[in-house]
Image (tube, grey):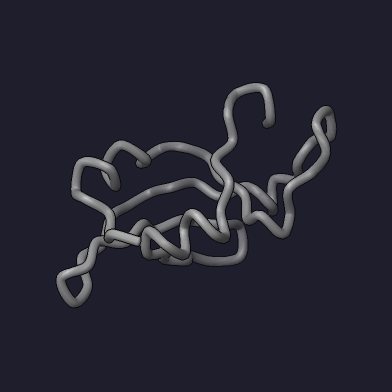
Amino acid sequence: MNPFTLDEAVSLIYHLAVLKKHVLQPGQKYSITQIGHICGVLTLNDQIEIAIKFHDGMRQFTKEEFYSQVTLLDNQDK
């Protein structure tokens, strides 16, 4: 998979996300500890990564890791 472009990565800032391993059935509510906030963009070794702040710490994801491990939440999922 191609790496994030700067525009792609920046467009995700301020979105809420949850790890796919914590995805709930429709209608169920997430715990505040399961929801992450996309808060930044990093450039490491010429590759752009997304930074997500979760309750228990910060994690960073390449584009491939992001799409395989993270689901974005829309307003109705919170």
Instruction: Please name whichever residue, 18 or 57, is drawn nearer the observer in this view of the structure.
Output: 18
**Which quarter of the figure is the C terminus placed in?**
top right
Q: In the image, is residue 36 above or below residue 56?
A: above
Q: Residue furthest top?
A: 76
Which residue is rendered at x = 15% and y = 70% of the image? 46
- 33 displayed left or right of 5: right
- Residue 37 screen position, x and y as percent: 49, 46
- 25 displayed left or right of 54: right
- 40 displayed left or right of 57: left
Instruction: Please name whichever residue, 44 or 35, is drawn nearer the observer in this view of the structure.
Output: 44
Q: Residue furthest bottom?
A: 45
Which residue is rendered at x = 56% and y = 50% of the image? 36
- Residue 16 screen position, x and y as percent: 53, 40
Q: Residue furthest front?
A: 1
Which residue is rendered at x = 54% and y = 66% of the image? 57
Which residue is rendered at x = 29% and y = 47% of the image? 9
**Which quarter of the figure is the N terminus placed in?**
bottom left
- Residue 65 screen position, x and y as percent: 47, 64
Q: Residue furthest left?
A: 46
Q: In the image, is residue 55 above or below residue 16?
A: below
Instruction: Please name whichever residue, 50 or 65, is drawn nearer the observer in this view of the structure.
Output: 65
Task: Give the tally of numbered discs.
Answer: 0
- Residue 12 screen position, x and y as percent: 37, 40
